[in-house]
Image (tube, coloured by chain):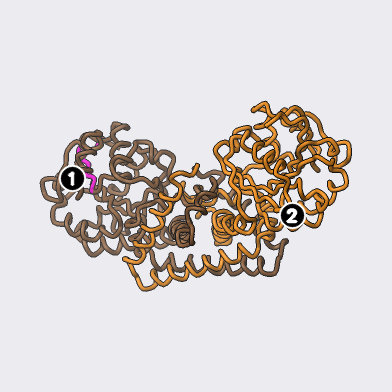
Chain colours: A brown, B orange
Amino acid sequence: MRVLEKLVIVGVGLIGGSFALALKEAGAVRQVVGVGRGERNLRRALELGIIDAAGALDERTLGDAELVLLAVPVGQMGPIMHAIAPWLGGRTIVTDAGSTKQDVVDLARRELESSLARFVPGHPVAGTERSGAEAAFAGLYRERKVVLTPLAENDPGALALVRSAWERCGARVVEMQPREHDAVLAAVSHLPHVLAFALVEQIARHEAPERMFALAAGGFRDFTRIASSSPEMWRDICLANRQALLAELDRYRGGLEEVRAMLERGDAKALEALFSRARDARAQGLKNVQ
Amino acid sequence: MRVLEKLVIVGVGLIGGSFALALKEAGAVRQVVGVGRGERNLRRALELGIIDAAGALDERTLGDAELVLLAVPVGQMGPIMHAIAPWLGGRTIVTDAGSTKQDVVDLARRELESSLARFVPGHPVAGTERSGAEAAFAGLYRERKVVLTPLAENDPGALALVRSAWERCGARVVEMQPREHDAVLAAVSHLPHVLAFALVEQIARHEAPERMFALAAGGFRDFTRIASSSPEMWRDICLANRQALLAELDRYRGGLEEVRAMLERGDAKALEALFSRARDARAQGLKNVQ
């Protein structure tokens, strides 16, 4: 990948900020301009050297940008696309970091119609429960997966540039269809988040939750860590991927019915078989996953 | 606490082995004798200095023991109590580390009738997903909670000794009723385990699980870590605490119904409110919990 002259990050949080830092560390970008609603966060991003300048959704910022990363919650993706569309230069390549892909693709077809050849949808499968520029770090994407869901209309050069930018961040890029991406993420990410939020809510609703939390051990802490994630972001993701999430949730409810029946009838053999299968599947499945 | 002359550990795994190591490190025990079904594990415990000798469930091992810790899966608690009862010395104090308490108390009333004054039920709320003597370490209980559920029949001296032994391990001891212990643990430990096993099972049942695991990020890994726990142990716990677990599971199924309805009707406000409440409750609840 040639060195990018100008990268614009819309939304300089954990995801956008870490992308900028990683490319800077790799010597892959000359200038990073940050755009965002929070002035304080942008100032912090400047202080931390994540961005070199603060910009706006206007011609001056976007007209000569080589690459624009939209790293905002999926609920803001539509308005942001609408706002940038008039100012994108004829060579500007746009990508996003949205956690869902079919809805982003649908929005892009509506809002970025004249730049579709240069819009490459993406999703870096990485993150922590922390957010904001303060949380960004150059190593976030190292050995992590980034899913690209290229459009039939995509210019091969645009796809190649986005791919190599992520590779310079240390990520491993895979390509798939938006629907497949959304179905997989519903199962391995969106459903677990809902389950963790629901469990904490259940304990909070008990009569004396502090007595219960007091006996929570490391397992509970790990299990519920994702319930510390941003409520706004997860609200958006759940709604953006509602159909796939509902399908996984219903499958899960069916699974719980089965376990419930095993417990009810005291079926030691079935419980042990289920737990063993799950333990082995996890060990096998995560063996080669960072 | 005076130095214990002879401690017997029945079940020299992560829990029993760590108890022995912690007391040794604290200079609180002179001799530790280990008993267990696995000869290889006992040999390893000897090599690692966890125990000083291997014993058996007989008069020689138990007759002059000051303290006996039963650190076996709850499913084995009944037969073990039955086996030790005839050989316990008149001053031998017995405690256990079972993850459920009401069933252990019921078993003790049946099997240890003549030694009830010196049987103090307990549960160290600590552990990792690893098991066996190999996994034991002296620091496991540092700053962790240990719940004791003393019997009305308990000799105060027996309770004091068990309490101070755990305190010498660095643990913080709390006392509660067996039923309350079981209800709390069903919510913060047993249910999460069942939920994690069920989620991994769901992914394993998909057509191409390896494609799904490949996109599992840190959140999934943390959420499902407890699904790497021992299937036999968790089968026993689930059955031993079946009533409380079923109650929490049904509460959870009700909670999922509510979330499902929010998703179905696209209720952004309700989803965000739920996620926010959960995030705040977790932050608040775990603030002072190690």
Residues under labels 2 and 1: Cα distance?
59 Å
Main secondary-structure element of the magenta-colored stretch: strand
Q: Which mark is residue A39?
A: 1
In this rendering, the answer to whether B88 lies above or below A240 is above
Q: Nearer the viewer, residue B186 or A158?
A: B186
Q: Residue at x 73, y 42 (%)?
A: B69
Give the residue furthest to the left. Answer: A60
Q: Which residues are magenta?
A: A4-10
Q: Secondary structure at mark 2?
A: helix
On the image, which quarter does residue A149 sit in?
bottom left
Q: Chain of mark 2?
A: B
Mark 1 is surrounded, within 10 Å at the Cα level, by few (under 14), some (14 to 19) or many (20 or more) other residues, namely few
Instruction: Give left or right: position of B82 versus B11.
Output: right
Q: Residue at x 49, y 61 (%)?
A: A206
Q: Is residue A129 something one can see in this rendering?
A: yes
* Residue that label 2 marks: B75
In this rendering, the answer to whether B261 lies above or below B96 is below
Closer mark to the observer between disc 2 and disc 1: 2
The percent position of residue A255, horizontal first and vertical second, equals 57, 66
Instruction: Give left or right: position of B203 versus B161.
Output: left
Q: For residue A7: magenta?
A: yes
Q: Chain of mark 1?
A: A
Give the residue furthest to the front. Answer: B156
Q: For residue A135: magenta?
A: no
The percent position of residue A38, horizontal first and vertical second, equals 20, 48
Q: Amino acid at mark 1?
A: Glu
